[in-house]
Image: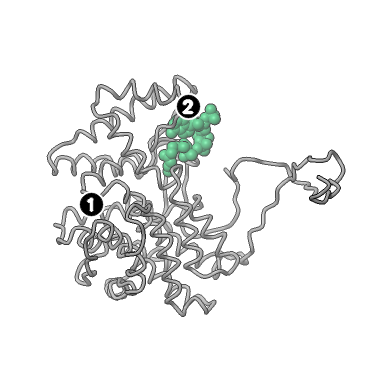
Amino acid sequence: MESCQPILNTGLRGFQVATTRISDVDGTLGRLIYRGYLVQDLAGKVSFEEVAYLLLFERLPQKEELENFKKQLAGERGIPPEVIAALETRPKDALPMDILQAAVAMLAHHDLDTREYSPEAALRMAIKLIAKFPTIVAAWDRIRNNKKPVEPNADLSHAANFLYMINGTIPDDELAGFFDTCLVLHAEHSFNASTFSARQVASTRAHMYAAVAAGVGSLSGELHGGANTRVMEMLIDIVTVDRVEAYVNNLLDSGGKIMGMGHAVYKTDDPRAHILAPMSKKMGERTGGTKLYEISKVLEKKGKEAFKQRKGRDIFVNVDFYSASLYYYMGIPVDLFTPLFAIARISGWASHVLEEQFGGAGSKPVLYRPDSEYMGDYCGPDQCSFVPMEAR
Ligand SMILES: CC(C)(COP(=O)(O)OP(=O)(O)OC[C@H]1O[C@@H](n2cnc3c(N)ncnc32)[C@H](O)[C@@H]1OP(=O)(O)O)[C@@H](O)C(=O)NCCC(=O)NCCS
């Protein structure tokens, strides 16, 4: 098909493909806004449940509304025994993000709301998924370690309950509070790859589970949510602070990327990284050593210098950089770092699916259908003449 539009192989950078009232990332000023609030004004002050409410219902809840919402989430934490049984049949070394994606699809089999295309049904599915994500991730971690999944505890907050289901012990307030802040910081980030994937699927009027499963798949890649695991692998490889400089130079000279640095939108510091860095230091001190934090600090400095030397411009750390050492200090297995991201981001994805299907900031829902220029110049300007098998 002939196109009258310019061909832009830019991965849609800088293109506005929809309107949204959910969040905004100002990459120049380094600002992230959830429904009107700067993320740094929310982190440490509100719980993940409050943020999820804000994202879904467009305003912060009143006390009673929050209590009801928490009860609703706590009541939806369980997952059907059939899904647990299916997880038990999976190879123990399956990638946790693949397990999460498969579990989301399986949950759809158990939910009649999938048959109803309405904002009410979509909201119910959103709440169920937000509630169940931690249960799936924790259950899988127990199953692969030959342990029985721990039943969710409805008396605990969303954050504390996840840590409880992973470890089998109730975390103290400081640990649960740190994890809660991580969830708040990772809850939403406008039209990133996974959110766009979820919205694109939602635009076909597919149900919430289908859209969210697409988001999980997209988040798993190392250029997106998978980067936090890669950052941790890098920190483990580096071993000591004195090896950072040589490591960075080797990495860049061999065409590698410093994981946790660079961003498609931020051209300055990612505001979330500033909140996570001191949390990593504190958590390191609490667990008896800040070596990984110290390596991260030096890596940030040396990485910036080495990048500038080669490219003549600045690069900045992103949300994944300090969350890696922080999660490690919290005792989270390295390959669960990306599922942790998903446990938070489901609140953003679900809000975007709702907006895409039922409330597009004044715009009509529309099926995404971009175009491409066909470059298949196989037979010159003419179409190829078909040759039957026996004559090829
Ligand atoms: C996030 C990311 C994909 C953004 O990519 P992008 O939009 O293409 O980035 P930019 O346009 O700013 O930079 C492009 C150039 O910088 C290089 N670059 C970007 N991030 C880099 C990094 N972390 N390490 C080394 N080089 C990097 C690219 O290779 C490219 O080089 P080229 O011009 O020679 O081809 C990229 O920064 C990256 O891969 N970072 C590491 C993975 C990561 O942390 N992802 C999580 C993001 S929240």
Residue at 48%, 68% in the rendered image:
208
Residue 33: x and y in percent read 42, 52
- As displayed, is residue 74 above or below residue 381? below
- Image-based side of 231 in relation to 392, left or right: left
Q: Nearer the viewer, residue 184 or 380?
A: 380
Choose mark 1 or mark 2, whichever is in front.
2
| Disc 1: which residue | 178
Q: Tell me if I can see residue 352 in this picture.
A: yes
Q: Nearer the viewer, residue 189 or 74?
A: 74
Report helix, strand or loop for mark 1: helix
| 10 Å crowding of disc 2: few (<14), some (14-19), many (20+) | few
Q: Tell me if I can see residue 28 in this picture.
A: no
- As displayed, is residue 266 above or below residue 299? below
Pick the quarter of the image with the C terminus: top right
Residue at 39%, 42% in the rendered image:
227
Residue at 47%, 57% in the rendered image:
215
Q: Which mark is residue 376?
A: none
Residue 134: x and y in percent read 31, 62
Q: Earlier in the sequence, mark 1 or mark 2?
A: 1
| Disc 2: which residue | 255
Which amino acid type is shown beneath numbered disc 2?
Answer: Gly
| 10 Å crowding of disc 1: few (<14), some (14-19), many (20+) | many
Question: Where is residue 308, by image quadrant?
Answer: top left
Q: From mark 1 to mark 2, how far is it between C-alphas? A: 35 Å
Residue 170: x and y in percent read 15, 61
- Image-based side of 317 in relation to 192, left or right: left
Residue at 30%, 60% in the rendered image:
140
Report helix, strand or loop for mark 2: loop
- Image-based side of 134 in relation to 217, left or right: left
